[in-house]
Amino acid sequence: MFKKILIANRGEIAVRVATACKQLGIPCVAVYSEADAQAPHVALADEAYLIGPAPVPQSYLVVDKLLEVAQQAGCDAVHPGYGLLSENAGFARRCEAAGLTFIGPTPEVIEAMGSKTHARDSMKAHGVPLVPGSEGAAKDLDDARVIAEQLGYPVMLKASAGGGGIGMQALAGPDELEKAWKMATARAKAYFGNDAMYLEKLIVDPRHVEIQVFADHHGNAVYLFERECSLQRRHQKVVEEAPAPHLPEAVRQRMGEVAVTAAKAIGYTNAGTMEFLVDAQNQFYFLEMNTRIQVEHPVTELITGIDLVQEQIKVAAGQTLSFGQADLAIKGHAIEARLYAEDPKTFMPSPGQITGLTWPTGEHVRIDTWVTATTLVTPHYDPMLAKICVWGEDRATAVARLEAALAATTVTGIKTNLEALLAIARHPEFQAGSYTTAFIPTRLAGQPAHA
């Protein structure tokens, strides 16, 4: 097992990793920016090091500084969490070169799955169903026009190196392509340093369902069922649940088997997620692979009883998976609601000083957070404040507990999306589990059409 782990992240995921380290009896090291000096992950870690000013490019993304801290503290492993450098193959290589175990897949797999076009090609080669799309990136705008006509509108324009909805544009017809191309390529270049774009046929009003996979270094791989992630704004998730409501058991099993086969074929190790679009006929199509732990991993933990972060650490240390496919079963239902510091009318970040805070309590409520009643929420980081998670013996119980938990939550001093989350929990279509990715922009009263 590892002697000491550097947590190369911040916020609630840094708290989550530190907690897992403590449960395993492994010392952990935190890094923090000047803005995060009083953050909970700093206090929870065994050691903590200042790495720079608040802006991410000057602190949490400075690889040289992270590796310097790891060396100074005597770490032999690095957990990247999610976001920031978690899917950066170059960072994983630098860790390896410094003699540190990167807790995640190999740099080669991260690189291969980080390119959406390469990932599509790889999945196609291994028999994974794909949304019809371009063979590789479009050469230029004219090439994109030809591809779009061949696919047939509506189409989706996507950044090849992208994620989180950045550089993604849905196009209803050819008159929208040129403007969307200019905007999407500019955003992709700014965020990813790569403006390559590809096109896919747009699946109208699909569900977004992802499969949690886990593989060790000894040839073992499993799927830990699925998560429903269709409640999104601007292609970013807001509420997730496990298992997916109304997904036939045969489809669940087939998706899981496909995901495991693909993970084995690409030599995947550690935790990862295969994301799919599911149409009205329950046909599923590969969307992308996330080569890290997901924000929404708690709902999988709640229905399986598996601590995914502890398992990440054990597998990275060379241990075999502590469970096989036959050991896994779905127990009850879990739902996660993401609480954001954002203007509920625009979904734009709304930083500020928290002046009061109340969390719900109860045996089946779990709060993953990084804020306290006195936290100053700065504009430098992702605006997510907490994940409010509940478990129930069945979905109806879980939905009722979610509504009660949200109603018992209070945050004062800043604007949040709490009322929007309550509106979701109380909506008849959500309560019936009969929603798609169109829910928030079309069903949530008072929300902007661009959501």
Image: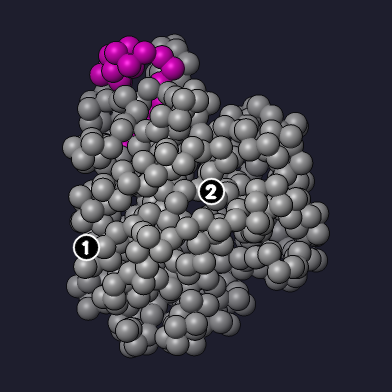
The vertical placement of 331 against 60, above or below, is: above
Vertical placement of residue 144 versus 433, above or below: above
**Quadrant that contains the C terminus:** top right
Depth check: give the residue in front, 211 or 340: 211
**Horizontal placement of 440 versus 52: left or right?**
right
Amino acid at dot 2: Pro
Q: Which residue is mark 1?
A: 219
Residue 224 position in % (x across, y down): 42, 56
Front residue (pair 365, 446): 365
Q: Which residues are magenta?
A: 141-160
Q: Within the magenta stretch, is there residue 144?
A: yes
Q: Which residue is mark 2?
A: 243
Q: Residue at x 41, y 14 (%)?
A: 153
Q: Say which element carries label 1.
A: loop
Residue 158 shown left or right of residue 16 in the figure: left
> How busy is the neighbourhood of tag 1: few (under 14 within 10 Å), some, or many (20 plus)?
few
Q: Quadrant of residue 287?
A: top left
Q: For the point 75% across and 31% down, which residue is it?
A: 445
